[in-house]
Image: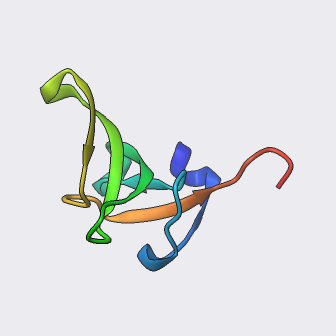
Amino acid sequence: MQHTYCTPISWNEAQPGDLVFYPDDEHVGIVGGRDESGNMLIIHCAFSQNNVVITGLEGLTSIGHPLYYGE
């Protein structure tokens, strides 16, 4: 449902706080910034690791800027 409250953006427009989605919106992550090489860092909960992790863009298919109250 979070995807429906986002404005689609391009990967180049990504800013910290934007949401990223896996196919069929089965999982969501948050853009946390970029590493020293310019690669996007994604924060999300990884069930397989039983923890919150920071990963790259592997497997993600779309990105959006969430609509906040007052926008």
**In front: 39, or 50?**
39
Tell me which residue sits at (34%, 38%) in the image: 44
Tell me which residue sits at (38%, 54%) in the image: 21
In the rendered image, the residue lying farthest to the front is 36
- Answer above or below: position of 12 versus 70: below
The number of numbered discs placed on residues in the rendered structure image is: 0
Tell me which residue sits at (14%, 26%) in the image: 49
Q: Indicate the position of residue 47 as horizontal and vertical percent values.
A: 21, 26
Q: Left or right of 24: which side holds 56?
A: left
- Answer above or below: position of 9 versus 61: below
**In front: 71, or 51?**
51
Q: Left or right of 11: which side holds 57?
A: left
Q: Left or right of 32: which side holds 47?
A: left
Tell me which residue sits at (45%, 78%) in the image: 12
In the rendered image, the residue lying farthest to the top is 50
Q: Indicate the position of residue 71 as horizontal and vertical percent values.
A: 82, 55
Q: Indicate the position of residue 67 as horizontal and vertical percent values.
A: 70, 53
Q: Specify the color scheme.
A: rainbow
Q: Indicate the position of residue 37 as horizontal and vertical percent values.
A: 26, 70
Q: Quadrant of residue 57?
A: bottom left
In the rendered image, the residue lying farthest to the right is 70
- Answer above or below: position of 61 versus 66: below
- Answer above or below: position of 43 versus 61: above
